[in-house]
Amino acid sequence: MGKNREETGRTDNRPVSEGPAREATVKHVPAITFLAVSIFLAYSNTLNGTWALDDTTIGTAAGIEGALNLKLGYRKVTYLSFLFNKWINPFSVFNYRVTNIALHIINSALVYWISLATLRLPEIRERFGRLSFPVALLTATVFALHPININAVAYIVQRMTALSALFVFLSLLSYLYARTSSGKAAPALLYGISAGLIFMGIFSKENAVMALPLIVVYDLFFISRFRWKGLLPKIVIGLSGGLAVIAISSVYLDFSKAAGELWRVYLNMNRQIPPLGWTAADVYWTPLQHVLTEFRVLGRYMLLLAAPLPDLLVFDRWGMTLSSGITEPLSTLFSFAVITALAVFSVIKARKLPFVSFGLLWYFTAISLESFIGVGSDLYFEHRNYLPAAGLFLGLSAQAVGSVGPVIVREKTLLAAVFLTAVLLGGLTFTRNFVWKDSVTLWTDTIKKEPGNVRAMVAAGNSYMKLADLKSAAVYYEKALSLSSSSGRAGYFHDAAYSLGMASLFAGDLRQAKKVIDIMDSRLSETYTTSILKGYYSSLVGDTDGAVRLLNSALPQAGGIDVITVHTLLGDTYRRAGDPDRALGNYKKAVELDPSFSAAYYGMGDCYFLKKDLVNAEKYIGKTLSLDPSNPLALALMSDIMLVKKEPLQKAKAYADRAVSVSSAFYQPYAAMGTVLIVMGREDEAEQYFGRAAQHGLRGYRLPMAKARAYFIKGDEQKAGIFLREIAAMEDAPASLRDAIKKDRGGHLSR
């Protein structure tokens, strides 16, 4: 009674019982549809984008199934969701990322619902009236489209972050309805559901444990409203289930061990953190440095929350400058002062400015585990703001509108602000998301913004390796090797050296490869990776027995992708030695371990081509290209297969065209094109391509042999004979081959 219609949110005489159902149709469905469409548009240019960092483990058999062991490991709920994607299509980035986007849409709808339910609580709804709907939608829109959340959506493996937040949101809603329920049975059931959801969240990502203090903060501000009498018993009853869940979870996650390790780390604040199961790779800081540096990190996050410009956002800041003291650098002191002032402000002004105070306390509480408590984890990742930002956005939006009131601010005005916010933030997110179009773009953008990021340099080198641009890959590996050496980063020094050695061997640069092997021998203790490089080197110089011995010696120590690599290199060694059956045995072991390893399928295809089994050769080279469409060696071999099968020449040329368009390191694509052109009768053009093949390593007797083979395929044995006689006079040609030619038995060269 006494409230005007605008304050109550009712402007007609319909019965109250009709309100929620009608509102669900008139407001909620369009609101959630608006969020869904906006999110999809903002993230549409990431759907076929790249993987990043540990995303690559998701597509392997060991990466998912191995993580689902209930007695070991973490994040089972997340890995079950990855297993679902793998069942649909294990190699499709679209498949994984569209799931992430759908999850973000659900989370945005939950932020909308939490905000709406909060603004309609007793003692709060009178302040907002009809404006509760547009304020809730504004909060959800900012959360849905703010660029700081990009890495929690586009970075596939960080589905962990989004899933964890999902269960925290649902747990909070269950708790809210339990605390405000007037029944007797319903609250107990809802408290139990809330506790179970925390359990699910912890098994998505461990930071869901922060749901407990976050629920306390929420209750204090919006349900209890700082009425301390009887508050503690209610909170204890409501959260006892959550504490029980943590106790049960610790049986599987071994929280006690992690807590003990963390405690020992804190006891040595000025000693470099040792590598532990939960620490970042190649930790190079002390606990004190971590804590001090995080004040600057939070300052950076807050800058991004206020000014989310694409040029300020960066995927990875590994290697950032540490804070060695409160004034070293001086920005540490400034960040500490600002953050401390905001925290104190949120406590002092909790009653007078409840929404902004809640938002700040929620933010600092939610981010504290990964930023300040878990010292030893990576110093900087923007996706860590996902859960913290949700409460902050609610606090800021509600405080801004609530301070003015429904009399001055109109619903239509706020809805217009929602639309403008969506356009602005959605546009910034869409622009930033272009970095996800491919790995090279993502990592070169990261290096541009963080020139000292060794991890990004190794990743950029890996990206160029996938494109068969071995020269560019080597450049980044060499930079990473130099930086990691000067900064004493042993882990990345090893990774850069090993990768540079592999790139050199792939390119046939044996001199550079030997140099890298010598560096690893002198700077690193004996590792199985050095044995892998030495084995591959021996294989390329023709020492088959030495290669097999070295590669087999590495197998017992190797793990993960390295086991697959060793089996593939053993296959390459036997194939190079003319033993396709043993080669096939090793390639099959590789693809059994990882059905997505395209290099092994290429080796199998080439083996079957050696055995003149064109059906299986085409099958496995086709499999290679389905996994790696730009593989120049597979494209070149498919061109050869088409020629030998007497397929239309244009079909063979199409593969050769694609091969030469992507290759700058291998001779095979140019030789394949030269062969196609000879068969087509375009001999002058063919010579140009054979010249390029020679520049890329097709030298000595192998060059005239490739030309002889091309004329054999064409059926011109007379011209083929000219090149065979040339080979017979070359000292580098194998004696058996020269003898065969002299005895006029060169027909076997049709391969």
Image (spheres, helix red, strand yellow):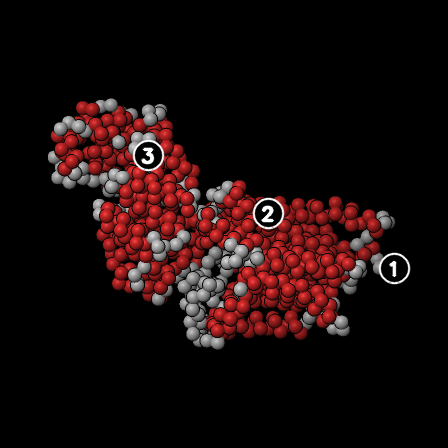
User: Which structural element holds mark 3?
Assistant: helix
Please name the amino acid that badge 3 sits on.
Tyr
**Image location of residue 168, percent across then percent down:** 63, 58
- Answer above or below: position of 12 versus 392: above
Whether tag 2 and tag 1 are in contact, CB under 8 A, the answer is no
Q: Which residue is mark 2?
A: 102
Residue 90 x %, y %: 49, 43
Real-space Cα separation, disc 3 to disc 2, in angstroms: 43 Å
Q: Nearer the viewer, residue 268 or 480?
A: 268
Residue at 68% x, 65% y is 239
Q: Tell me the residue at 39%/51% (across/down).
A: 561
Determine whether the residue tagged by mark 1 lies in a helix, strand or loop: loop
Q: Three-letter amino acid code at disc 2?
A: Ala
Q: Earlier in the sequence, mark 3 or mark 1?
A: 1
Sequence-first tag of 3 and 2? 2
Single out the mark in the foreground, 2 or 1.
2
Pointer 3 residue: 608
The residues bearing labels 2 and 1 have C-alpha atoms spaced at a distance of 43 Å
Q: Which residue corresponds to the image point at 68% horizontal and 51% vertical from the top-left?
A: 416
Residue 692: where, in percent of width, then height? Answer: 25, 38
Q: Nearer the viewer, mark 3 or mark 2?
A: 3
Which label number is shown at residue 1? 1
Q: Please state which of residues 286 and 405 is positioned toward the viewer in this rendering.
A: 286
Q: Amino acid at mark 1?
A: Met
Closest to the camera, between mark 3 and mark 1, is 3
